[in-house]
Amino acid sequence: MVEKVGANNNIIHHQTFDVSVDVHKQGASKCFDDDGRLKRTGTVWTASSHIITAVIGSGVLSLAWAIAQLGWIAGPAVMILFSLVTYYTSTLLSACYRTGDPVSGKRNYTYMDVVHSNLGGFKVKLCGLVQYVNLFGVAIGYTIAASISMMAIKRSNCFYKSGGKNPCKMNSNIYMISFGIAEILLSQIPDFDQLWWLSLVAAVMSFTYSTIGLGLGIGKVIENKGVKGSLTGITVGPVTETEKVWRSFQALGDIAFAYSYSMILIEIQDTVKSPPSESKTMKKATLISVIVTTLFYMLCGCFGYAAFGDASPGNLLTGFGFYNPYWLLDIANAAIVIHLLGGYQVYCQPLFAFIEKNASKTFPDSDFINKSIEVSIPGFKHPYKLNLFRSVWRTMFVITTTVISMLLPFFNDIVGLLGALAFWPLTVYFPVEMYITQKKIPKWSTKWICLHMLNIACLIISVAAAAGSIAGVVGDLKSYKPFKSDY
């Protein structure tokens, strides 16, 4: 039913969030895929840009600090280990996108759908809880990181004008609010597949600030006329033995967070066209992305540690190991903010879609949830479909993450905790268990034993990383006053 409303000819129509078309009647065509949905247009390169946007995020900025805790031997070794595990388990997960035949089997649109098709039962609810709580946490982490970078721009200019005499302290709240307002606007983009342009911009920005950080690190090493750091990392003395252990554990969480993107892999894969099969495309995209990100991580982390040694800041571009050239730092931090604007959306769209899909199923007759208004926007070919429920709930979501960020503005510890919580269940446990089920790998076979050994080893690492990050948060809270965080 279509009904004109008012003089401006805005149109209200019924919107269904999960279109269900009889595949046998619809069939594949030039406009529709085999499941009756509009043709997917994603490629290896758009999938890679989504992954790079998600992976090369704020986590890269804490890697010099992470390597400083672990040292020249363990630091790079752990980073390579995480990259290999992430790539391998991502290929296992991407193979589960279709149930049955990898080319023509039933599609699974979300991570939860994949778990439902392969494992079922309580594990579906457990997966959803871990995945969506983590996506919520990433939104908080990105808000904190963006505000720190915005403050860094103002502080670097302040340092420059005062010649380093002014401490240039400022409150982070106004910057978090500004970031939140921008995200409220961007959150009105309806679907994941309409974010490709934002992901491309964000991916370019991530390379921009990573390259600047790398360049400044190399410059600092040349200036120092030598490489700082030690084989075992920060020494006992400046920190206690207990602090050394907790910091090492937290460093594992920081590195895990830097590689974490499995929770949105299936949603990215669902934007990819076929043929070739979606799993083949995602394997290529994952390989490209992991190689590129590992190269950048090794360069940024290692040169940052070489430049500052045990004094490596928690955030390479905002910890003020660098002061000049101030304009270059401004460009780097502006690139971080732009990247985080896009990264926030890449991570949150699956959560948005989950809530909206379930609300539509629960209240199928609600006009507030299911109807949208077509609004003509000057300069745009197609009208914007304004859905009231989507607009209200997404706005409330952004407001909530912003307020929590203002309450807990601990960048390094939050990053480590998020990495620890997401890494084992989403990156390792579920992909391994689903792969074993789908491929019917015999119990106690060599491959079965190896996969479970990987599972157990990664669980131990995640528990240790979570413990270290929680210890860091507890330490931060001792001298913290809510909504009064100055930098």
Image (cartoon, grey):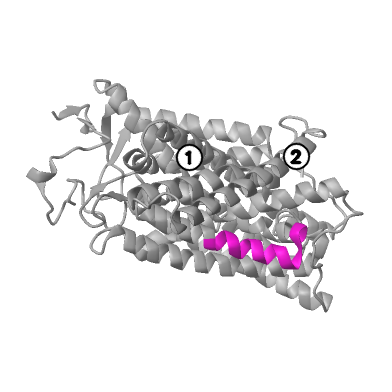
Span colored in magenta: 68-84
Q: Residue at x 9, y 45 (%)?
A: 24
**Nearer the observer, 419 or 172:** 419
Magenta residue check for 304: no
Q: Residue at x 80, y 74 (%)?
A: 227
From the image, give the main secondary structure of the stretch colored magenta: helix
- Label at residue 131: 1
Amino acid at pointer 1: Gln
Structural crowding at the residue carrying mark 2, measured as other residues with C-alpha within 10 Å and reported as few (<14), some (14–19) or many (≥20): some
From the image, tell me which residue sits under label 2. 471
Q: Is residue 52 visible?
A: no
Is 369 rendered above or below residue 120? above
Amino acid at pointer 2: Ala
Structural crowding at the residue carrying mark 1, measured as other residues with C-alpha within 10 Å and reported as few (<14), some (14–19) or many (≥20): many
Residue 177 place in picture, x, y as percent: 60, 37
Quadrant of the snapshot with the N terminus: top left
Magenta residue check for 73: yes
Q: Residue at x 61, y 69 (%)?
A: 211
SS at mark 2? helix
